[in-house]
Structures are given as C-alpha cells and as structure tokens.
Amino acid sequence: MTDLTSMTIAEAKAGLANKSFTSLELTDAHLAAIEAARSLNAFILETPDQARAMARAIDARIARGEGGPLAGIPLGIKDLFATKDVRTTACSKILGNFVPPYESTVTSQLWRDGAVMLGKLNNDEFAMGSSNETSCFGPVVNPWRREGSNTSLVPGGSSGGSASAVAALLCMGATATDTGGSIRQPAAFTATVGVKPTYGRCSRWGIVAFASSLDQAGPIARTVRDSAILMRSMAGHDPKDTTSVDIGVPDYEAAIGKSVKGMKIGIPKEYRLDGMPAEIEKLWTEGAAWLKAAGAELVEVSLPHTKYALPAYYIVAPAEASSNLARYDGVRYGLRVPGRSIGELYENTRAEGFGDEVRRRVMIGTYVLSAGYYDAYYLRAQKVRTLIKKDFEDCFAKGVNAILTPATPSAAFGVGEKGGADPVEMYLNDIFTVTVNMAGLPGIAVPAGKDAQGLPLGLQLIGRPFDEQTLFSLGEVVEQAAGRFTPPRWW
Ligand code: GLN
C-alpha cells in the first residue's frame, strides 16, 4: 500500500473511492504520524477516539455511496475554531479548559462534507503573532531546517500549528485564519499553500474573534488543488455571520488547469523594498516569468498607500482586539482568579490569563480608541484603510486580474530570534500581507523556491473580490513551474 500520509487530498479521495484503503486506515496512519511528531508541538489536543469514530462512520457512508466531497479526509483544526464538546482555547490561558457547546460554521461544513477531525492545532495566542511563539502551549517547530543545522525554526504564525502539521504530513489539510497574514506567512515558511479568502467568503461564526473586520478563515494544504477542494467546503453564506456574503460557492477545483492566457498580472512597484534580500527579488522575477510563459501579460502597477498599511493595521487590529477581548472577564468562561471585589476579579483574571503580546495589543487598542486619541489614531487609520482599498480598486479597474508579490520578506527564522527587544521587528513580517486584509481581498501563498540555506520561500497572488478562482488558476501555474517541496524527516 502507498504511504498513506504523503498523498494529496485529491489522491486520497481517489484511493478511498476505489477502495484501496479505508478512512479508518488513513486516519490511523495520521494519528501514528502525530504521535511520532510530538516534538513539533503542532497539535495541542489529539482527539484519536473521536477521529476513529468519525472515520468509521464515514466509511459506512462511503459504502452506502453517500460520501461527501471530503469523505474520509483527516484534517487538523486551528484552536481558534470552536469545536463542540472539544476543548477550544485560542491558545490562551484565559480560556482555560473551555469546551464549547457549539461548532463553528466552517468546521461544521467540513464534517457535513465527510472530513475527519484529528485534533486541535497550536497557534499564537488569540492569533496575535507571526511565529507561533505567543501560544500558551509554547512554540511550534517548523519541520524545515537550514541545511546542515539543527536550529529550531518557527513555522510562522499565527497558524503555525496548521502549517507545520500539513508540511510534516501529520494531516492532509488544516483550517487556519488570517487577520494580517496568518495563513499566508506560515504557508510560505513551510512550503505549503495558504488561502486567505475574500472578507465575507467564509463564515466567522464560532471562530474566536481577533479583529472582526479583518479576520477570515481559510485552508492550508499541500497543493493548490487541495486548497481549492477545502475552500469549497469552508466557504458559503451563513446567516449567523452578518458579514458573510450571499454569493454561491463555485467549484474552485474547476479553476485548476484553466488557461491564464491573456490575464493581466500587476507587479506593484511599492513592494520592491529597500534592503529586500536578493533571493526574494529573484523569486519574484522568476514567478513573473513563469506566469508570462503561461501566457499572462505583466504590467507594472502602483499601490501608492502601501507604506501606510502596516502602521494602520497595527492601529485597527489592536483597536478591534481590545474590544473583542473585553468579554474575557473571568465570569463568563475559562479562567477565574478571585479578588476582593468584582473589579479586582476582572483585573486578576486578565492579568493572569493574557500573555505579554495580548496585553500589549489590548493597551494599544484601548489607547487608540480613547476619547482624546480616537480621531488622531483610530479614525485616521480607517481613512488610510479606505485609501489602501482604493489603490487596489484603481488597479483592478485598469483590467488587472491579479497582483503578484513576495509572500514574506524573509524565510523562516529561529525560535527566539526575533521581536524580543522590539515587537516591531516581528510586525514587519506582515509587510506584504496586511494590505490584503485591509482591503478585504483574497490572497494565496504558493511555495515557489528555496533560499541559499535550503529554506522554502513563497509568492503571493492577490485577487479581485470573490475571484478566488483566478488565484487557484495562477497559483497552479506557479506550483507546476516551481515543483513541490517536502522537508526531510528528522523528528
Ligand atoms: N502577524 C499579524 C498580527 O500579529 C497577523 C496575525 C493574523 O493574521 N492573525 O497581528
């Protein structure tokens, strides 16, 4: 029998359909892989009993000819998604052992379509971070290492567990969320494919909120096709999320292999940063050449407000976070640290329950929303956001179908290497990704090459609103040209 963990979702679907193996066998193979990879710290909760029960049930469904589009496929779930009767913590001490009595819409759609849950995946606390180092469960280790080195590298964040688990063949795909880059940056750091859909494409219901006007769920998978397969199940209108948009979900997989001939691809000149590593520059040029060879037309475009995106994001996101996180008061759920008065109980609980980065965001957010500073910071950042969105609109109005940029300004870095003294050093990771969230657009990160140390690098494609299909078509061109990358197994 073929190795059950190294297949793509598309291959596994075919194998399940022609009865080469059962979902239970596929699930068991992944549970064993997870057990053998505990040193990566990607899974913070393994749910083997539930996984086997789901797999048996789906095997019966398949036998009756009733399997759905994800029938029997084992997945990992970021711990930001509420899973009914399964502990959900957002990797924060403040949620303690919270067990939701409900299921998030996105995960419920995955189970509806026959997927199997292997367990919950590590992430930065409340998804705040770019390295998975802010998790109360400790950092996740990237399965990739620099050539000839044993240094532990971060998998990126905040969906570090998702990216690491998919890259290390612990699950066939994973859910993730992206507020400023948390799907695309970890995908780029681990040679996986990450899709941040258009704002409103996937329901946010049942996902722990970070910054509600920016948060979007999406998949991390090993191929562009697999990410398209997962997207179809994750997307869709949900009346329980008022920002979810009522547009039919297309067959994203049908976009794979579609010709990109004649498409106009924008290369934004403002993304060519001073001091950008030559390797990133080279990768970008190479990516453009691949798209050109496939028949696309490349045009230089200008997104003049790009340089304000990061500072504006670090006002809008903390502002919304400070408001969203007000609910963690020690009364409603999770951790409770008593005090002599109710005020003291709130203070003690929040001081004990939130980690440093979350506290920093709450303080920044409260400050920029305070009466004296609201206009100067929050309102101003919202105006900047409108201008950033307009930059993209102008560009698309000129007939540009998608925009090509690097996904990250560097490859994966070492655990503990960045952001210790200066948090801005960590925030700079998001330089190419936050604009997309600020404008509500879809973006995909696709593995495109390696740096001199043998670490994966990714390219990003940014699309028109609700045109994820074009990103899948273009992403597959990049994937075909670049090839696929798998880390050598050492764990
Ligand atoms: N790294 C960014 C932040 O820390 C983005 C995180 C995310 O997308 N959830 O805010």
Image (spheres, grey):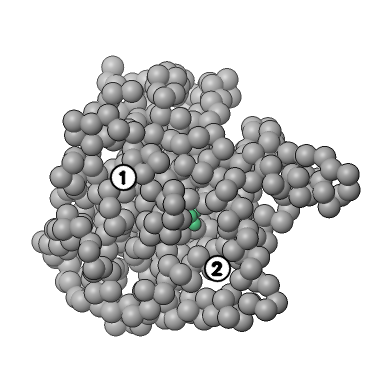
Q: Would you say residue 138 is visible in this rendering?
A: yes
Q: Earlier in the sequence, mark 2 or mark 1?
A: 2
Query: Which of 174 and 274 lies nearest the eye of the viewer?
Result: 274
Say whether residue 62 is left or right of residue 266.
right
What residue sits 89% from the left and 48% below the top? 341
Determine whether the residue tagged by mark 2 lies in a helix, strand or loop: helix
Determine whether the residue tagged by mark 1 lies in a helix, strand or loop: loop
Q: Residue furthest right?
A: 341
Mark 1, ligand 1, within 8 Å: the answer is no
- Quarter occupied by residue 331: top right
Q: Quadrant of the N terminus?
A: top left
- Quarter occupied by residue 310: bottom left
Q: Residue furthest front?
A: 421
Q: Residue 33 at x, y = what percent?
A: 39, 22
Instruction: Tell me, for residue 412, which label it has, or none.
Output: 1
The amino acid type of the residue labelled 1 equals Ala
Q: Residue 126 at x, y = what percent?
A: 57, 48
Where 270 sits versus 394, above or below? above
Which residue in the structure is indicated by mark 2? 316
What residue sits 48% from the left and 71% below the top? 312
Q: Would you say residue 219 is visible in this rendering?
A: no
Total labels: the figure holds: 2
